[in-house]
Amino acid sequence: MIDGPYFVVTVLGVLGTCLVAGVFCGFSTFVMRGLATLPPARGVAAMNAINTAAVTPPFMILFLGTAVLCAVIAVVTFVLWPDEGTVELLLGSALYLFGSFGITVVANVPRNDTLLKLEPGTAEADAYWPAYVREWTMWNHVRTGASAGAAVAYVLALT
């Protein structure tokens, strides 16, 4: 059984990955659906406002802090190679670091950056909006599942 500081870090990993999964799940299940019903100019403006608000300390501490915790868990697992939970700990770390953080960097953020460069109400923004919503949401589903899967893997490592 995992104990001591390693237990605490793993529990914090569960908490962080769960919270991030919840944020992403909210976007996948209702935020993006709601934004998609708006006229493109309003949807683009609203999403740009959301993306700007997301890059503030509260969410970034959660999102990046969880990535750091997952990396620490992976490194400590490789160093200690515990008798129990090794596979689950490494799987949880990989799911979050690649499936949540990595997808954010290579799929969601580039789309956000492109959208931010577009002036709401222009023909270019109106044309990009439907593809943005569809593609961004698809990748967000992946991030949601990866974050939730990481939490489950960490919980299994603790049992």
Image: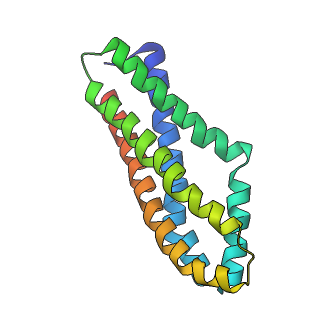
Q: Where is residue 34 shown, x and y percent of the image?
A: 58, 77
Which scheme is used to colour this image of the protein? rainbow
Residue nearest the observer in this picture, 154 or 79: 79
User: What residue is rendered at 66% in x and 79% in y?
Assistant: 125
Which residue does the image show at 72% across and 84% down from the upper left?
Answer: 122
Q: Position of residue 129 (x, y in %)?
A: 59, 78
Figure quadrant of residue 49? bottom right
Q: Say whether residue 38 is visible.
A: no
Seen at 33% across and 30% down, the residue is 90
Instruction: Give the vertical position of 143 relative to 8 (above or below).
Output: below
Residue 61 shown left or right of residue 132 in the figure = right
Looking at the image, residue 147 sits to the left or right of residue 16; the answer is left
Left or right of residue 132: residue 54: right
Q: Nearer the viewer, residue 152 or 75?
A: 75
Could one spot residue 83 in this view of the protein? yes
Judging depth in this view, the residue of 113 and 72 nearest the camera is: 113
Q: Which image quarter is the N terminus in?
A: top left
What's the residue at 52%, 39% (across, down)? Answer: 16
